Every structure is written in structure tokens, then in C-alpha cells.
Amino acid sequence: MTRILITGASGLLGAALSAEAASRHTVTRVCHRHPTVYPGTEMVQADLTQVGELDHVLGDAKPDWVVHCAAATDVDRCELEPDWARRLNRDLPSALAKKVRAMGARLVHISTDAVFNGEAGPYDEQDRPDPINVYARTKWEAEVAVAEALPSSLIVRTNFYGWNVQPKLSLAEWFLQRLRTGLPCPGFVDVTAAPLLANDLARILIGMVERACAGVYHVVSRECVSKFEFGRRVASTFGLDPGRIQPVQVEEAGLRARRAKQLCLRVDKLEAELGRRLPDIQDGLARFRALGESGFAERFAHAP
């Protein structure tokens, strides 16, 4: 069995990865502010930005692979606090890549579709990033630093949703909560992406680890839709009224950081590697509902 260490393990993707990997591999989960417990895995609570913590955690776990999910993902806060964003999104993965190289292990670094400016998609892995906000810039800088420090790294650009095990909402959960409580449900008609269910992403990532993939890959849904259309599909999947989703422009939202608008990514490279098609939006949403009904998030106990 491969020893896999997952950072950001109480986050949306980290939790899905924990569940996917636990049955086939030895999993150590690193949590910070929201420690959670999952059967068949070991949990370590640590702030990896603190001096000595990386050495301590890596030394104890002795992983074959590290999947680095931890990140500062609040785009508007990153714009307000660029030093915070750089520390978490650039400096930490750079330091981690160097430590992983020194111990002879491998690294999966989770990046974002937002490294592109959103003006000329769909983008493939050869297109040059051009980030337009602090969050995206720090994620792109991390890609560069990780690739320089550890050329065998697997760098994954993605966009995902799912069930959170901590008190925050993914895009699908946000639409669903507002639909169920009668709150307004605005959806951007001019912002498009290809979000993938976090559990599907986790399954793909574990497969890529098992195949020892390296380099940059786009791992998203093979279908690209506006946030407005995504909200309508969430509603339909749960038997709610898609007419409740209100079409709006992103400029109407009063967001602090600029958002890239057209973030469709090509997945030809990954589909060729895997020998199969990636899920489309409706496939993922059907599984999203099934996971919710099966109590997926409730399987993670909050640590004392």
C-alpha cells in the first residue's frame, strides 16, 4: 500500500480524498483549524506554515506521496491580504516541494483554473497562464515554484464542488441552501467553468497517483457551463424550481477581486492518459445528490 499524506484534509477536496484513498492506501490526514476524524486514517493537527512543522509531519508520516490541498481560497480576502495569500498559496507549497524532494517522495499540487485570464478559453495545458487577481497570481507562482523544486510533481488545475465537512459552502451547496430556504439565488451568466464533483476528482487523483503521473494536467468536468446554468441544474437535480435562479452579471455582485469570466479547460490530455471520458456536469450532480442522501459528510467526526 502507498503511504499518502493529505494536507488540508478537512477541506472539501481533502475530505473526499480521504474517503477515496482510505480503502486502498495508508492515509495520514493533516488538519489545521477544523480537525476531523475519518475511519481507517490517521489525523495530525498542524499549522504547516509554522517553523519546523513540515519537517515534523513529514518525518513522522514518511509518505510516498503528498497531496497538497491546503490553500487560501477566499478570493476577496486574498485581494485584501496579499501577504497572507502568498504565505499560504505560494511559500508553503514551494517549501513543501523542497522537503518532499529531499525525502525522495512525490507531490501532487492542487492548483486552479483561475490561473488563466478568462478571455481566450477553452485552455489546454500548453496555454500560458495570465492571472488577474492576487489569489490566482499566488496559485500560478506556486505552480512555477513547485515545478522548479520538484520536476516530477503532478500539478492539477481544477474547479470542484461537493459536500463540505466544515462550516462553509461549495457553489452547489450555496445554491441548494438558498433554494431550500427561499433566499435569492443569483447566478452569473457571464462566468463559465467546468466544475467537477470533489469525489470524482478525488477518485481521478488517486488513479493518477497510482499511475505515477507527472506534469501539468487539467482535471475538470468535460462540460463547461455558466454559474447561472449550473445553479439551474442543481435545482433540477434536487426537484426544485430552476426558475428561482436569477440571471445576473458578475459586475453586479460588488466583488472586491476581479474574476476571470471564461474558464473552460480542455481535458484531452487526461482523457488520453486514462483512456476514458471524464464526467459531465449532470453525471456529477446526480452523484452529488446520492452522496448527500447517503450522509457522506456525516461520516467525518469532528475531533475534540
Image: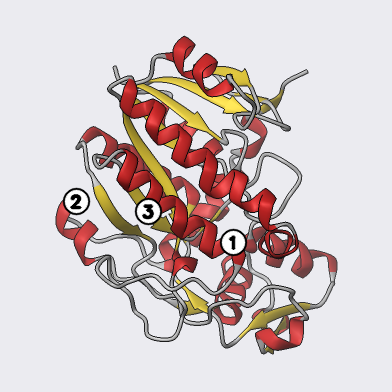
Left/right of residue 245 with respect to residue 104 in the rendered view: right
Determine contact: label 1, label 3, CB under 8 Å: no
The x and y percentages for residue 128 are 33, 71
Point out the frontmost of discs 3 and 2.
Answer: 3
Q: Quadrant of residue 46?
A: top right
The residue sitting at 57% across, 67% down in the picture is 237
Q: Quadrant of the N terminus?
A: top left
The residue sitting at 62% across, 74% down in the picture is 231
Residue labelled with disc 3 = 144
Q: Residue furthest right?
A: 182
Residue labelled with disc 2 = 274
Residue 204, can we see it? no
Q: Which is nearer the N-term, disc 2 or disc 1?
A: 1
Count of labels in the image: 3
Q: Quadrant of the C terminus?
A: top right
Residue 81, can we see it? yes
- In the depicted view, which residue is nearer to us: 112 or 144? 144
Classify 10 Å Cα crowding around label 2: few (below 14), some (14-19), many (20 and above).
some
Q: Amino acid at mark 2?
A: Leu
The x and y percentages for residue 98 are 38, 32
Relative height, residue 86 to residue 44 (above, below): below
Residue labelled with disc 1 = 135
Classify 10 Å Cα crowding around label 3: few (below 14), some (14-19), many (20 and above).
some
The residue sitting at 44% across, 21% down in the picture is 27
- In the depicted view, which residue is nearer to us: 203 or 57? 57
Mark pair 3, 2: CA separation: 25 Å
Point out the frontmost of discs 1 and 3.
Answer: 3
Q: Which is nearer the N-term, disc 1 or disc 3?
A: 1
Relative height, residue 127 to residue 142 (above, below): below
